[in-house]
Amino acid sequence: MLELTTEYGRVCVGSTEELFAEAARLGGAAWAAAPRGRFAWALTGGSTPKAWYRWCVDQRALPAETIAETHWFVSDERCVPLASDDSNFGNAQRQLLEPLEMPVGNRHPWKVALGPEVAAEGFPAELWRVAGPGRGFGLCFLGLGNDGHTASLFPGSPLLSAAALAEAAAPHFAAVEVPGKGWRLTITPAGLRACDQIVVMATGAAKAAAVERVFRGIEEVSAVPAKVLRSCAERMTWLLDEAAAARL
Ligand code: 6PG
């Protein structure tokens, strides 16, 4: 696996197997670095994580203590029931948490039934009961959209306006209505900065343009939202396969 140091943090370029193994290793390391019983791991949505979930289950890749003691979240969510195929936490639960018999009490889905704004308002308290007041996730998984979005921070998001980015006490999580996608729940730039470690995994040729826009482009954060991660560079790991890194 090729490793690069960039202004956006550590970049690993390798095979899918190498990336999956590194993601699991980073999870175990983040668990070991966290205070006992206070490790909050946020998974993410989309198709990339589903392949990693299958790999983790097939390879029994997560250590027993990680399985027993990690508190599971997702860094963003759609406002749909857990049973929906669109539910990020629902997919993580069906494809990783249940097969590995993760303790039910350590599973923390967004409370979407309360409605987007109430769910977003109540989310930090549940995380802080685990991680400690004002703390972020011990490890936050993210993906990268073909348009450069990450979590549910999409191009043009009000959460990426100059005012929002400059807000001193910006919320760590928010509900945001995304044109054409409905209401989303998401970690915000302030929430990302509160995380101890962040991992972005992106694979496939369709990600190459977004990777190039993030790492080499001169567009604003509001146009290429994943550029917001530059402010988290010292805690970032980007896991890219060769196709996604082709224009890096
Ligand atoms: C979501 C995700 C989203 C995802 C990217 C990449 O809720 O859809 O959080 O940000 O990570 O869209 O998705 P793929 O891995 O499917 O390309």
Image (cartoon, rainbow, N blue to C red):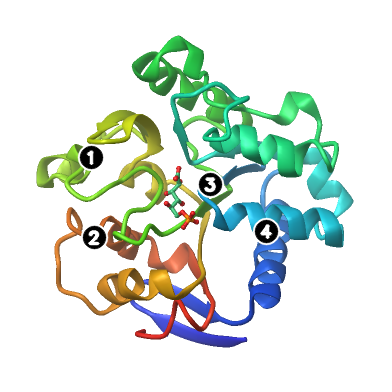
Residues at discs 2 and 4 in contact (Cβ within 8 Å): no
Residue under label 1: 159
Regarding mark 2 in the picture, which secondary structure is present there?
loop
- Please report contact status of discs 4 and 1: CB closer than 8 Å, yes or no: no
Cβ atoms at labels 1 and 2 below 8 Å apart: no
Residue 36 in view in this figure: no
| Crowd rating for badge 4 (residues with CA inside 10 Å; few <14, some 14–19, many 20+) | many
Q: Residue at x 41, y 47 (%)?
A: 151
Mark 2 vs 4, N-terminal side? 4
Give the spatial CA distance, label 2 vs label 4: 25 Å
- Amino acid type, residue under disc 3 in the picture: Thr
Q: Is mark 3 within 8 Å of ligand 1?
A: yes
Three-letter code for the amino acid on which mark 2 is drawn? Val
- Name which residue lies at 14% across and 61% down: 220
Label 2 environment density (alpha carbons within 10 Å; few <14, some 14–19, many ≥20): many
Disc 4 vs disc 1: which is toward the camera?
A: 4
Q: Is residue 185 visible?
A: yes
In this view of the protein, which residue sits in the foreground, 207 or 35?
207
Residue under label 4, please give it. Answer: 52
Spatial CA span between label 1 and label 2: 13 Å
Image point (48%, 63%), residue name? 235
Q: Is residue 49 above or below residue 80?
A: below
Q: Nearer the viewer, residue 178 or 175?
A: 178
Eye-nearest disc, 1 or 3: 3
- Report which residue position mark 3 lands on: 44
Q: What SS does tag 4 mark?
A: helix
Q: Which residue is mark 2?
A: 224
- Locate residue 37: give its quadrant: top right
